Amino acid sequence: MGEGSIGVLMQAGHEGLGVVLLVVALMAATLLHTMREERRVLYNTLGFFLFSVAGQYLAALLLALTQQGVAVTLRELFIIAEGLAVIRLGGLFLYQVLLPLVRLRPPSIIEDLVVIAGYLLWGMYRLHHQGVELSSLIATSAVITAVIAFSMQDTLGNILGGIALQLDNSIKRDDWIKVDDVVGRIVDIRWRSTTIETRNWETVVIPNSVLMKNKFLVLGRREGQPVQWRRWVWFNIDYSAAPSQVIAVVERALQSADIPAVARSPAPNCVMMDFAESTGRYALRYWLTDLALDDPTDSAVRTHLFAALQRAGLRPSLPQQTLHLIKEGEKQAAQRHEGYIAERLALLRPLELFAQLTAEELRLVAERLVYAPFARGDVITRQGAVAHWLYILTEGRAEVVLEAPGQPRRVVGEITAGQSGSFFGEMGLLTGAPRSATVIAASDVLCYRLDKSGVEDIIRARPAIAEELSQIMAERRSGLESVRHDLNEASQLVAKQQHQGEVLAKIKEFFRL
């Protein structure tokens, strides 16, 4: 190869190739630092660009070998390819770097359309550079254009559909939509299709023309409202329970519970939906704030619902055809009852509140206990409420919380099952006083409830027990007051003596001793 051939190779690139290489290098370095995902697009574009530059040197080599016709054609093709790569890279740089700097995030389809427009302008410029008259080309290609448009009507429909969806704001990124039996979150809207990801870790690609021609649902979206989606949890209750009772029990429990992904407003509500053949058909409706957690949140809501129904003595009804009744003998029923009483006595004996009761009195209390389960997050009792019963924990733990207007909740204690102090609400039981603190289930809680009537006969029969109970209650109350007001040891002793006198007087007044 002679010196002339080497000179041709040295001048193989077009005049601005050096500047283009510098610009491409700067954009590529910035994009490599900025882009965290979809880097394969960047790598492919850079590979295509390098291929086009190498092709220009190949054309120069052919030109040096006197293959002028082929060399000129190849050089032009590779210059066009270089321009396409630079336009694609420029689109990435604009969309991934420049627009985020000014906090703009236009839809992906805009990027596609801008890049396509750049391709067309670049192609028209190269044709004009080669001496092609564009006006005559357009006039003579009208028939060809019509044929191409007819053959690409589906593709054009997808493009126009994507543009229309973006312009009228029908859907956008991160929307949850339902198309036929597919439910998922929109992750991208391109010129040809819309991509959604389902909860089952599936990626579904839907042509834009399908979305334009068919009905689809945008889940959880309402004008001027936060994103939340109403869910339905169905359950059946026997007709022996009044609908008003069922609705009140369910709404009170669910509206006070703290369940993740369940909206506070609108609050959960319960409605009776139907009179079925053997049961009342109810629905608990709540608003889901995280649409990706539909099944887990439904499960959590059902757990709270089941516990609330059990506490109220309302059991979900069974289909009549599968209901089997077994008549127990008196001996079997008595044995089962004694087993229940033995379990309750074992629970009551270690508790300091009942330490002064005789065996007969303790058994009478055990007979009056009512089973009351709570789900985690349930408010077992609220500060300021009036309720004449106490709770005894058998499983789980609960937090004691003080509430003050305009201040956050303050956890001041914990009640754990199996300990000597695993009861609360004794002031309401024995004096009728409002609750001094809020108690919230910190885990799933199993407990028994004892009403005023369960101890009234005992106190009336042996009034002296009122003084013993007042001493125990004064100790617990002074402990709570010391936390609330930061009392020292001497102040605690004075407060305890004062509380004991007040509590004893209230017990006597409450039970009319």
Image (cartoon, grey):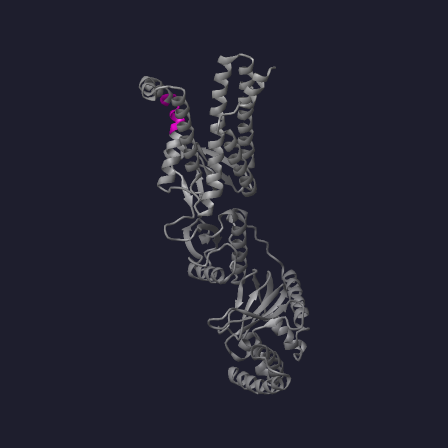
Position of 422 with respect to 402 (left or right) is right
Residue at 49%, 30% (x, y): give it: 85
Closer-to-camera residue (273/189): 189
Residue 468 coordinates in the image, percent (x, y):
63, 83
Residue at 64%, 75% (x, y): give it: 362
Quarter the N terminus occupies: top right
Q: Which residues are magenta?
A: 149-156
Closer-to-camera residue (131/411): 131
Q: Name the magenta segment's main secondary structure.
A: helix
Number of marks: 0
Determine the image quadrant of residue 213.
top left
Residue 347 coordinates in the image, percent (x, y):
66, 69
- The vertical placement of 389 against 257, above or below, is below
Quarter the C terminus occupies: bottom right
Residue at 36%, 22% (x, y): give it: 150
Position of 270 with respect to 469 (left or right) is left
Residue 251 coordinates in the image, percent (x, y):
46, 60
Would you say residue 98 sits in the magenta stretch? no
Residue 275 coordinates in the image, percent (x, y):
41, 51
Q: From this viewpoint, is residue 214 visible? A: no
Residue reaching furthest front? 3
Q: From this viewpoint, is residue 244 visible? A: yes
Determine the image quadrant of residue 171.
top left
- The vertical placement of 466 against 314, above or below, is below
- The vertical placement of 357 against 141, above or below, is below
Determine the image quadrant of residue 424.
bottom right
Would you say residue 154 sits in the magenta stretch? yes
